[in-house]
Amino acid sequence: QVQLVESGGGLVQAGGSLRLSCAASGRTFRSYAMGWFRQVPGKEREFVAAISWSGGSTYYADSVKGRFTISRDNAKNTGYLQMNSLSPEDTAVYYCAAERFIGRVGVGSHDFGSWGQGTQVTVSS
């Protein structure tokens, strides 16, 4: 497993942007796919985006496609989620996750074994 720490959350107005970062410990991070999930109170954790270990494949939830961009820098052991055109519906705690996959990257929260502590994103109307 890897240890993950998210940062970059905060309060932003609707239409604004934020970039979340996920710093990973361990030299094996480059062999892990990474995902971003979000959760609001009373609801299940929701898939947002994922990226393969190489960065060559990316996956997005329909609700964020065209607005969010997932990326990674393996040299820095860090993943990112650039969020543009934010709306109040994007308000949630955002979690990064990591896992090794053989083949296609999973998009369910149960597919990932390493998790960060989460960072709050609040979008005001």
Image (cartoon, helix red, strand yellow):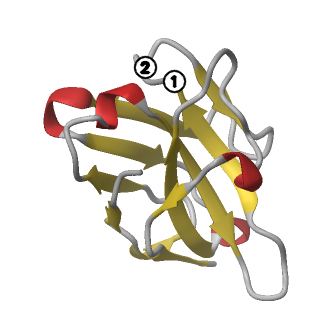
Report the residue marked by disc 2: 55
Report the residue marked by disc 1: 52
Tag 2 secondary structure: loop
- Residue at image coords 31%, 37%: 29
Front position in the image: 84 or 15: 84
Outermost residue to the right: 43
Residue 98: image location, x then y, percent = 49, 46
- Compared across the picture, whether 86 is left or right of 8 comes to right
The answer to the question of whether label 1 and label 2 lie on touching residues, with beta carbons closer than 8 A, is yes
Residue 105: image location, x then y, percent = 66, 27
Front position in the image: 63 or 116: 116
Q: Is residue 125 above or below residue 42?
A: above
Q: Is residue 55 above or below residue 39?
A: above
Of the residues shown, which amino acid type is indicated by label 1? Answer: Ser
- Residue at image coords 56%, 16%: 57
Name the image quarter holding residue 93: bottom right
- Compared across the picture, whether 1 is left or right of 78 comes to right
- Residue at image coords 58%, 58%: 86
Residue 25: image location, x then y, percent = 23, 52
